């Protein structure tokens, strides 16, 4: 089962870990020392399913269209001002 690959879109953020752990990059399958510069990937924004990945692997996957971001798959949302106004009314 590959839950990671099934996500419709991904949230990508720079990682800032201080734990001396080692992770396995879901994109290339190689090991990744957490203390080095890398990124976090959240499948469909789900932080409990986050994966640590090499920055270069993410860049490559993005270029190949294999790592769509939310804005790539969802219709554009209303502008920032419209969202702020709506939130104020709740
Ligand atoms: Zn990798």
Image (cartoon, grey):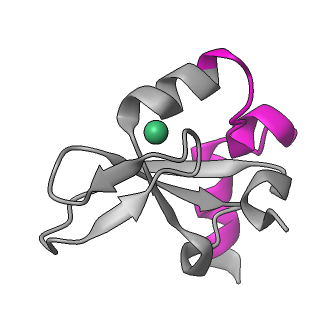
Residue 81 can be seen, yes or no: yes
Q: Residue at x 61, y 25 (%)?
A: 62
The front one of 31 and 13 is: 31
Q: Is residue 88 left or right of residue 68?
A: left
Residue 63 at what x, y percent from top left? 62, 15
Q: Residue furthest front?
A: 30
Q: In the picture shown, does residue 35 fall above or below 53?
A: below
Residue 27 at what x, y percent from top left? 58, 42
The front one of 42 and 81 is: 42
82 drawn magenta = yes
The front one of 4 and 78 is: 4
The front one of 44 and 66 is: 66
Residue 14 can be seen, yes or no: no
Residue 72 lies in quadrant = top right
Location of the C terminus (image quadrant):
bottom right
Q: Is residue 30 left or right of residue 3?
A: left
**Magenta segment, which residues?**
63-87
Q: Residue at x 85, y 68 (%)?
A: 1
Residue 20 at what x, y percent from top left? 14, 71
């Amino acid at each position: 089962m590959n839950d990671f690959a099934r996500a419709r879109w991904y949230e990508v953020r720079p990682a800032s870990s201080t734990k001396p752990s080692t992770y396995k990059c879901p994109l290339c399958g190689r090991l990744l020392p957490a203390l080095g510069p890398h990124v976090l990937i959240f499948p469909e924004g789900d932080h409990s399913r986050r994966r640590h990945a090499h920055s270069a692997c993410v860049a490559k996957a993005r270029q190949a269209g294999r790592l769509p971001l939310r804005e790539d798959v969802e219709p554009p949302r209303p502008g920032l001002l419209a969202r702020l106004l709506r939130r104020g009314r709740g």
